[in-house]
Image (cartoon, coloured by chain):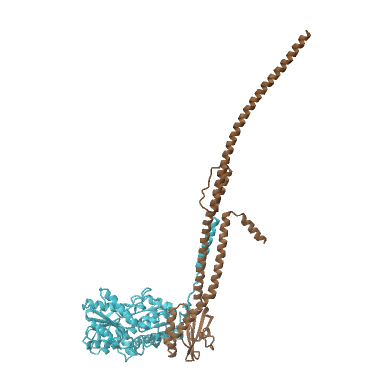
Amino acid sequence: MKNIKKIKAKFITLPLRRKIIISIMLVAVLLIFIAWISMEFIISHNLINEINNAKLANAKDIAERSRDFILTKDAAKLTELYFDEKEQKEDIAYIVFYDEKGKIVAHNLLDSKKEDLHRHVWTDKSSRSSIISFRRFMDKPVWAIDIPIIEENVYIGTLCIGFYKEYIDVVLNRIRLLAIGLLCIGAIITFFLSLFLTRIIVEPIEKIAETARKIGKGELKIRIKAQTKDEIGMLAEEFNNMAKNLQERDRKLTESAKEIKISSKKLSNRVDELERFHRLIVGREIKMIELKKEIKRLKSKRENE
Amino acid sequence: MKSRNIIIITIVLMILLLLLVLRTERREIREEDSLRNGIYENEMVIGSSSALTGHAGYLGTQTLHGALAYINYINENGGVHGRNITLISYDDQYDPPQTVYNTQKLIIEDNVFLLFNYVGTPTSVKVIKMVEEARIPLIGLFTGAHALREPLSRYIINIRASYYQETEKIIDYMINELGIKDIAVFYQYDAYGFDGLRGVDIALNKYGLHSVATGSYLRGTLSIENALEKIKNSGAEAVVMIGTYNPLAKFVKLARSRGFDPYFHSVSFVGPYEFAAGLGNETDKVFVTQVVPPYIEKKNFPVLDEYEQLLSKYYPDDMPNFVSLEGFINAKVLVEGLRRAGGDIDRRKFIDALESIESFDIGIPDSLVTFSKTDHQGMDNVFITEIEEGKFVLTKQVK
């Protein structure tokens, strides 16, 4: 919880640009993860079942084509058929036909003696139904399919076919790699897209911020060119209006300041005049007082005389 | 800077993921496991699958006799580096599935060192993939099939000239010496026949020509009538034939009995003596291209003397013939390869030794055996022969 709060706090302090990129990438990663899980689910449940069925169908087809030669006990034709199958399908590990006594009649291998094949190929000799299992054949995992050959309710033998699992794994892994590749490409595209979108979103805001800074410094004539009609465009418009108003106010203030200056000057002149007048009056008053004093002195003198 | 780092890391991760392609390889037989199969202290075991019975039984039997005549001689004289050569031979009756079965048996049950003396195109072509998978040499095939030459296989070593070379030789002769341009093709409906047909097309194409008609028959049958009718109606002046002795002999005789008398030609695989025997009196205007010289020319070809002596020693009931001569020559080249590979032989060394053979004289002047890493056909000579008094002679104009 503490960590989450820390991360949240750190996130909040990040620049807007980085916030947006991180947000978009987080959503993209989440979607990729969900897509990956879904794909694995589809592969493991659906695709593998389909491959299972396809291999079984393949094996049954080989069994059907072998039937005539099995019934005529034509080991040479069976051997030829099985080698031809191996040539055409790279994922065939082995095809071995056992007769009803468990003896190998034909197979398509070139480095295994018949006694060795017994150990590796056919394990459940009692079964009379098709079996699909995984086992190891000469150190490699194989999809082993055993198909009993029944003719008119009589058991003739069992055809054992092994498909290398690695060929199927290769296909599955190629699908996975393709998916990973596509998801990675998607992630890269998302990343660049997020950079592009972030630029589109954040640049106008940054311009507004820059303009606000300049306005703050006193450049009131600056205007933002509103390139969008969204909220940011509206914000830019409002900023322009604000700048216009500020500019108007500034002009008025300047004019008022001028008038005040003029009035102030007038007042100052008036004050000077008043002062001069006052000084004049005071001067006159002083002279009057002095005159009065002189008159009184002269009167007094006269009286004394 | 930080954004750039993220981009670089993402791209590198992607590349690493893409490079993580899980490659699977089909389980391959490790060459080291089988290099010295069939090699023992005093013996080396080789294997053969050929037509010893059936409609092509003559071919397999005679090539085998010719080869064994020389091998027995070598064994009687100490073998090769002290080892006798034992040849295990199975009959495939010229049937490809049987060839596959026999080959598998030779490789994993009999553990042979190499495969030798296979007869026929559809049979030999069937085992190409097996030979390459098992990494076992296959040498001395009695067939001139193109598929056994191209693409080049390290493990397949041909000694004789190809059908393409045979058909080219006869087409050149027919057009330049006989002035014939209307040429039809009668062929066995299988890989062997298709190969010969293709060879004729290529040879005719050199002159801006095409075959005037083609007809075929199924392998193992004598159903040649439909093909004959078609070719007869084309008015062909010559018919190039790719098949075996019985159907081809029947074709020629039936054609003549119906008043259709062009020149006839067959490639070497026909089984010349059996073919000649089947023709009876109808041997005029019949050519057979050979990849070995006719026995009658033995004074000019020292190998024929050696061959005659050894054949009469080991197979006194056999008359000298082209087929067993070819088997004989195959064995000579085989032994030369074994000798050059040395006492500490393995399959790899054997093939390297064969590839080192240059201008090896087997007793056919102007036709020295040469191999290389890019050439796995030892000889290129083609002889045009015709039948005179029951014997094959070199055609006079090309002598």
Front-most of B294 and B205?
Answer: B205
Across the whole image, how many numbered discs are drawn on residues?
Answer: 0
Quadrant where the N terminus of chain B sits is bottom right
Where B1 sits versus A49, above or below? above
- Give the chain letter for brown: A
| Display colour for chain B | cyan
Can the viewer see residue B43 in this picture? Answer: no
Front-most of A2 and A162?
Answer: A2
| Image quadrant assignment for residue A292 | top right
- Residue occupying the point 52% across, 70% down: A176
Front-most of B118 and B359?
Answer: B118
Where B14 sits versus A17, above or below? below
The outermost residue toward the top is A305
Q: Is residue B302 left or right of residue A191?
A: left
| Image quadrant assignment for residue A73 | bottom left
Can the viewer see residue A141 in this picture? Answer: yes
* Image location (x, y in percent) of residue B188: 31, 84
* Image location (x, y in percent) of residue A47: 51, 75
Where A163 sits versus B17, above or below? below
* Image location (x, y in percent) of residue A97: 47, 86
Q: Is residue A46 left or right of residue B178?
A: right
Quadrant where the C terminus of chain B sits is bottom left
Where B128 sits versus A74, above or below? above
* Image location (x, y in percent) of residue B344: 44, 79
